[in-house]
Amino acid sequence: MEYLLDTNTLLRALFNDEKISDKTRNIIANEKNQIFVSIVSIWEIELKHNKHPDLMPYNAKDIINALVYTDYIVLPVRYEYLVELKQVIDLNIHKDPFDHLLIATALEESMTLITSDETVLKYPIISTLKL
């Protein structure tokens, strides 16, 4: 199976946060699964770090350095994801552009998005799994 980690899940997985469920840990650890990360998440982390380093202690370099020790596949932003944005935005569930792009990515790639965000879990157009 193919899974896309949202930004929060990525941080928790990289830094072994106890809030990751056993189910999510098992999915990530299972070598039969492919785990994907969007470059959008790294971008979001960098922006948050620059704006509030006290709240976001990690920057893009920290994440990139940590990813070296994983088998995660980093996805670029492809134009197909941008085309899917309209469908995501039209649902009018929330306004977060980073989440929109992650949802569009999961939709286009037919991946399950792993998230702890209750709002993202409401999107009926993608498969989601609660962190």
Image (tube, helix red, strand yellow):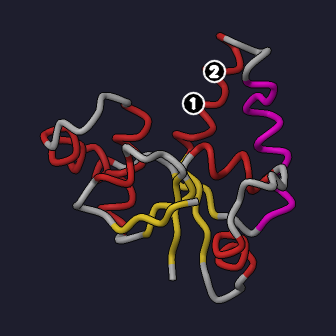
* Helix, strand or loop under label 2: helix
**Residue shown at the point (34%, 41%) measured from the top left:** 100
130 sits left or right of 56 in the view: left
121 sits left or right of 125 in the view: right
Q: Is residue 50 above or below residue 38?
A: above
Structural crowding at the residue carrying mark 1, measured as other residues with C-alpha within 10 Å and reported as few (<14), some (14–19) or many (≥20): some
For the residue pair 72 and 103, the one nearer the viewer reads as 103
Over which residues does the magenta segment extend? 56-70
Give the CA separation, mark 1 to mark 2: 6 Å
Q: Is residue 34 above or below residue 62?
A: below
Q: Position of residue 33 (x, y in %)?
A: 61, 82
Dot 1 corresponds to which residue?
44
Dot 2 corresponds to which residue?
48
Pointer 1 with pointer 2, Cβ within 8 A? yes
Q: Determine which of the numbered discs, if any, sits on residue 98 in the image.
A: none
Q: Position of residue 116 (x, y in %)?
A: 54, 50
Residue furthest to the top: 51
User: Is 68 colored magenta in this rendering?
Assistant: yes
**Residue shown at the point (59%, 44%) measured from the top left:** 7
Q: Position of residue 63 (x, y in %)?
A: 77, 41
Numbered label tally: 2
